[in-house]
């Protein structure tokens, strides 16, 4: 065996032999300033443990930077990519088991790098991280390694479960892609860093994340932090916003690709106020993105991540909003539109020449409105009773030792679905008001389909006031509204 190792070293395939795994029953982990627990005791809490050892115990660092004049936000720069080893532990039966071991760091061969990520969130004492494995792996262990494996993974702070909630709403609304996740405990260099959300990152992966053409596909963002990137495409919203790239990487973009993208976004932004915008964008995905943030009451209009993708440069390939992201400032606008009603969405809502976007927005609301509260309540109750929910409750107690913040799965789950329950009446009225009375399905036309939907609402008490069904404005919905609506149609 030593001869094989020596030969591999000569060939440049191995820098050093893999170190032995730690004894979980004797390895001590520090929580806060003085408290210590064995690694086994932390594994016993029930969540998978992301155990990171960096080379020479180097900590990831960054510089903190503020926006230049005329721009917005504050962010980080020069984030160091620290190499090391990542091990995933889990308690299976009564044994501490290793689900995955990256091995010691060797570029393109084994190990991983970890760095700080985010913008404003990176200023918090509980830092978010990005992990890049040297070899692809599905760290969520979903049972289909060939489908889900990837190099890039995120560790997000989600102390109040707003990210998990927002992603569940995204799934219910029908976003093209919803990142998958699992709560984990994170240990780095012998110190417990807290309970985190281990989450898929936004990137090209045609099998399981965002599918765009390898050579002429694009994933891009209307980015308030464009000033902190090496390459960007100009927006009419500049200097508040410009477009930055998620794919291709800015270092790999060719001059002809940059030229194409500048022409694309100029045509795209111009079309939003004109009749032809459905020729350029996937309207349903835009409406879904906005509706998710309206349900969640997002206050952060600048930082809620307007991601777009285009499969290739052909005319058949429309601009899609593939996912929602960033729910750190959700549940802030109980009786007003979310701040997603700015920039592109504001233009679409005010486009009087083509109301297809408003029609799609209202149609999506009708599709999910009747079951939304029950779906979210069942999701929260199921999570609370699940092994993951019980383990997260225990881990929140450990988290408190480090950050001195009281966290509760019980109060989180109740608060999250209570918000949605209390948010619905305002959304019903606001979405109804988008079009005049009589346009029951809010599609900018008054016709027999509105009569049909009005009758359905009379037969289904759960349909609620979201429909513009009180045609005669007497405060109730009954057969007289049907009669008046039929009269309106006959007069058209």
Image (cartoon, grey):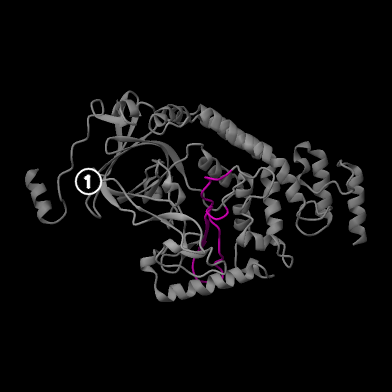
Which SS does the magenta portion mostly show? loop
Toward the front, the furthest residue is 69
Residue annotated with mark 1 = 55
Residue 212 visible in the current orientation:
no
Instruction: Report the front residue among 345 and 437.
Output: 345
Q: Residue at 49% of width from left, 64% of height from top?
A: 69
Q: Residue at 24% of width from left, 29% of height from top?
A: 27
Toward the left, the furthest residue is 3
Q: Is residue 196 above or below residue 394?
A: below
Where is residue 469? Give x, y as percent.
Answer: 83, 47
Q: Is residue 429 left or right of residue 482?
A: left
Quadrant housing residue 38:
top left
Which region is colored magenta? 301-330
Quadrant housing residue 1:
top left
Q: Residue at 75% of width from left, 57% of height from top?
A: 443
Kind of element beneath mark 1 = helix
Where is residue 432? Give x, y as percent.
Answer: 76, 50
Where is residue 238? Give x, y as percent.
Answer: 54, 67
Q: Is residue 140 left or right of residue 135?
A: right
Q: Residue at 51% of width from left, 36% of height from top?
A: 160
Residue 327 part of the magenta-drawn span: yes
């Amino acid at each position: 065996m030593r001869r094989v190792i020596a030969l591999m070293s000569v060939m440049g395939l191995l820098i050093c032999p893999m170190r032995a795994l730690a004894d979980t029953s004797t390895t001590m982990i520090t929580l806060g300033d003085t408290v210590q627990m064995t690694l086994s005791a932390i594994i016993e809490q029930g969540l998978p443990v992301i155990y990171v050892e960096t080379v020479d115990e180097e900590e990831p660092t960054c510089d903190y930077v503020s926006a230049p004049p005329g721009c917005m936000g504050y962010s980080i720069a020069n984030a160091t990519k620290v190499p090391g080893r990542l091990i995933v532990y889990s308690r299976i039966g009564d044994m501490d088991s290793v689900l995955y071991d990256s091995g010691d760091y060797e570029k393109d061969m084994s190990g991983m790098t970890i760095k700080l990520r985010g913008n404003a969130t990176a200023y918090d004492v509980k830092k978010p991280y990005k992990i890049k494995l040297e070899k692809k792996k599905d760290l969520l262990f979903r049972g289909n390694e060939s489908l889900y494996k990837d190099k890039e993974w995120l560790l997000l702070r989600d102390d109040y479960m707003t990210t998990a909630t927002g992603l569940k709403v995204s799934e219910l609304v029908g976003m093209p892609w919803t990142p998958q996740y699992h709560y984990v405990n994170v240990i780095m260099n012998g110190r417990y860093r807290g309970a985190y959300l281990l989450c898929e990152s936004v990137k090209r992966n045609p099998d399981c994340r965002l599918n765009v053409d390898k050579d002429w596909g694009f994933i891009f963002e209307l980015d308030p932090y464009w000033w902190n990137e090496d390459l960007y495409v100009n927006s009419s919203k500049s200097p508040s916003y410009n477009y930055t790239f998620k794919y291709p990487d800015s270092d790999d973009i060719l001059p002809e690709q940059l030229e194409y993208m500048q022409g694309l976004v100029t045509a795209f932004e111009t079309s939003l106020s004109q009749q032809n915008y459905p020729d350029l964008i996937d309207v349903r995905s835009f409406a879904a993105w906005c509706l998710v943030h309206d349900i969640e009451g997002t206050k952060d209009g600048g930082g809620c991540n307007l991601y777009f993708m285009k499969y290739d440069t052909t005319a058949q390939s429309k601009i899609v909003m593939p996912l929602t992201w960033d729910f750190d400032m959700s549940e802030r606008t109980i009786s007003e539109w979310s701040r997603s009603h700015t920039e592109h969405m504001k233009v679409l809502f005010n486009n009087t020449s083509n109301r297809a976007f408003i029609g799609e927005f209202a149609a999506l609301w009708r599709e999910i409105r009747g079951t939304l509260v029950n779906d979210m309540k069942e999701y929260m109750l199921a999570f609370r009773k699940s092994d993951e929910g019980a383990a997260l409750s225990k881990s929140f107690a450990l988290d408190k030792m480090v950050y001195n913040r009281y966290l509760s799965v019980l109060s989180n789950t109740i608060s999250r679905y209570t918000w949605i329950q209390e948010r619905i009446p305002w959304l019903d009225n606001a979405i109804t008001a988008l079009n005049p009375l009589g346009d029951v399905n809010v599609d900018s036309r008054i016709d027999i389909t509105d009569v049909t939907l009005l009758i359905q609402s009379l037969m289904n008490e759960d349909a609620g006031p979201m429909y513009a069904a009180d045609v005669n404005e007497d405060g109730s919905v009954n057969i007289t509204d049907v009669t008046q609506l039929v009269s309106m149609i006959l007069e058209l």
